[in-house]
Amino acid sequence: MVKRPLCTCRVRRGMMLADIVIAVVLLGITLAVMVGMAGRAISEQHAGEQYQAAAMLIDEQLNLVLSRGPDSYASRFPTEGACDPPFESFRYKIDISGGDTGDAYLVSATVTWFAGGRPQSATVETRIAPRRGEEPDPERRPPEVVDRLQ
């Protein structure tokens, strides 16, 4: 009787099974990382949209102060409150100071909102010259150049 060596088929099947298990584990890890990255990208996109809306609302409030004049704005118009729909989840606050003896007013506009359970805010400060008489196009340049790179 001739003895035959053991068939290597069983060994190959065991190696193929191990290769498949390793491939499935690597695929699972890769997919988990990709889903996490996609979730983070969506979250950052939403945050960017909120900051863009806040910037637009700040610009709107500053334009209202500019067009109505900073002199008596606080006594004639609200300086804080909820923004108009569809931005009622945002709140604004305007602080106006200075303007003594014809100097420019320091106007600060802040918009706040909640995102991810935490309060968020954006603030812009600028100077607005007072209105002088009924001159249609008054000179509004500040006496000094404003350094915006600080």
Image (tube, helix red, strand yellow):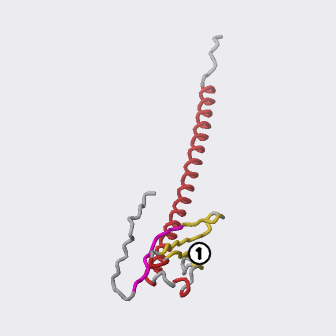
The foreground one among 61 and 3 is: 61
Q: Residue furthest front?
A: 101
Q: Main secondary structure of the magenta part?
A: strand
- Give the amino acid type for the residue marked by disc 1 in the picture: Arg
The foreground one among 126 and 140 is: 140
**Where in the figure is residue 4, as x and y percent of width and height?**
62, 15
**Where in the figure is residue 16, as x and y percent of width and height?**
59, 32
Q: Which residue is mark 1?
A: 91
User: Residue at left 54%, top 66%?
Assistant: 122
User: Residue at left 51%, top 61%?
Assistant: 45
**Where in the figure is residue 49, as x and y percent of width and height?**
51, 66
Quarter of the image that includes the N terminus: top right
Neighbor class of circle 1 (other Cα within 10 Å; few <14, some 14-19, many 20+) is: some
Residue 93, quarter of picture: bottom right
**Where in the figure is residue 13, as x and y percent of width and height?**
61, 30
User: Residue at left 54%, top 54%?
Assistant: 38
As drawn, 107 above or below 145:
below
Q: Is residue 3 left or right of residue 123?
A: right
The magenta stretch spans residue 129: yes
Q: Is residue 124 left or right of residue 146?
A: right
Residue 8, quarter of picture: top right
Judging from the image, what secondary structure is the residue with disc 1 in? strand
User: Residue at left 62%, top 68%?
Assistant: 114
Q: Which residues are magenta?
A: 123-132
